[in-house]
Image (cartoon, rainbow, N blue to C red):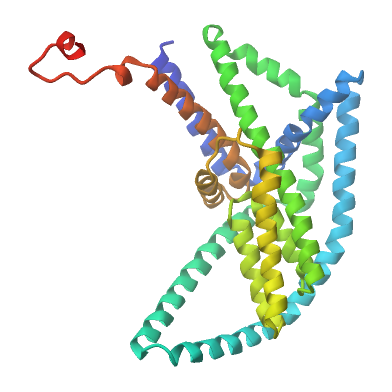
Amino acid sequence: MTARQQAFAWLLGFVVFLALVFVLGDVLLPFVTGMAIAYFLDPACDKLEEWGCSRTVATSLITFVFFAILVAVLMLLIPLISAQLIQFAERVPGYFTALREKIVLLMSLVESRLAEEQVRQLEELFATASKTALSYTAGFANHVISGLGTLLSLLSLAIITPVVTFYLLRDWDRIVGKVDSWLPRDRVEMIREQVGLIDETLAGFARGQAMVCVLLGVFYAIGLSLVGLDFGMIVGFVTGLISFVPYFGMLFGFVAGMGIAIAQFGDLVPIAMVAAVFGAGQVLEGNFLTPKLVGDRVGLHAVWIIFALLAGGSLFGFVGVMLAVPIMAVIGVLARFVLGHYLDSPMYRSKMVSPGESETEGEG
């Protein structure tokens, strides 16, 4: 098989993979979730194996501990979050009324300082921007949530995911070895090197960013609750958990938190304290958490991550969001590999030769 035929075969396989994800996205959700959890937990299983445990014992122990902790955290948080959600739904009309009154007051101050035509243009611009942002956000959220809603039930996710996690985690090394045996022998070292880079990229982003999101969620929840913001716990946790989308998580939390703060408080001091919590969270994330837990080895620019997550969510729902970063990591590593070969090729190094001179003369 020639190099062109191999490239065509890989491209065809990738297209078939995307088609299957598009058609079977809802069915694949527990399997993709189980695979992601198994990928996270594999280093812990390897460590227990080094300490003398069999793979089956290590897998059973790690899987049980992980899901036991997950269930305990959910049992602790769900009553608190559900109670805050009910209270939030009851207070939303009051928040909108308070915000509308303050916006009317602000607009009256603006109108006293601007010409009538400028005020009208400002109102139109604000209305258009708000409508566009709300419609796009609602459409994206509805598409992602529909991927969860069209599943047979969330109960199937809770039942199937632990089973998939256990079997994938138990057979992880065997699966990797089997796939490795299928690689073309003349290019096996090159492929292993690129797969290693992909694994390093995914490990750096996925495992590191997960820790960053959890720690940020705890920080925002505690900080906003101490300030006295209504529903500070739920706003803080959600802000942290969606911080895997660069800038979007903090922006969402800041807008939501400041909106509630403006409606709730009549004084500027607590509003400024809410803003300070988000500012401190950004300093903590940018200067301590992300450099320590994620580092510079990820190699994925924030713009590409945002694009991948939005595109994956729009095309394939929640499954697309989960697969976005791994696929982007693969594309990034392969793009750097191709670029490296190009920069090392005669096509890049050769000098341009004018039509009237020979290549030898041009080099001289």
Coordinates of residue 152 in the picture (x, y in percent): 71, 51
User: Which quadrant would the N terminus be assigned to in this image?
Assistant: top left
The quarter of the picture where residue 170 lies is top right
Coordinates of residue 284 in the picture (x, y in percent): 70, 52
Which is nearer the eye, 152 or 83?
Answer: 83
Residue 161 sits above or below residue 167 on the image: below
Residue 94 sits above or below residue 189 on the image: below
Taking 83 as reference, is 40 left or right?
left
Which is nearer the eye, 349 or 246?
Answer: 349
What residue do we see at 74% from left, 62% from top? Answer: 236
What residue do we see at 41% from left, 76% from top? Answer: 125
User: Which quadrant would the C terminus be assigned to in this image?
Assistant: top left
Whether residue 149 is visible to the viewer of this picture, yes or no, is no
Farthest residue to the top: give it: 186
Residue 260 sits above or below residue 155 on the image: below
Which is nearer the eye, 144 or 109?
Answer: 109
Coordinates of residue 303 in the picture (x, y in percent): 50, 47
Which is nearer the eye, 89 or 319?
Answer: 89
Whether residue 238 is visible to the viewer of this picture, yes or no, is yes
Callout count: 0
Coordinates of residue 27 in the picture (x, y in percent): 66, 43
The quarter of the picture where residue 352 lies is top left
Farthest residue to the front: give it: 364
What residue do we see at 73% from left, 54% from top? Answer: 216
Taking 341 as reference, is 139 left or right?
right
What residue do we see at 34% from left, 87% from top? Answer: 117
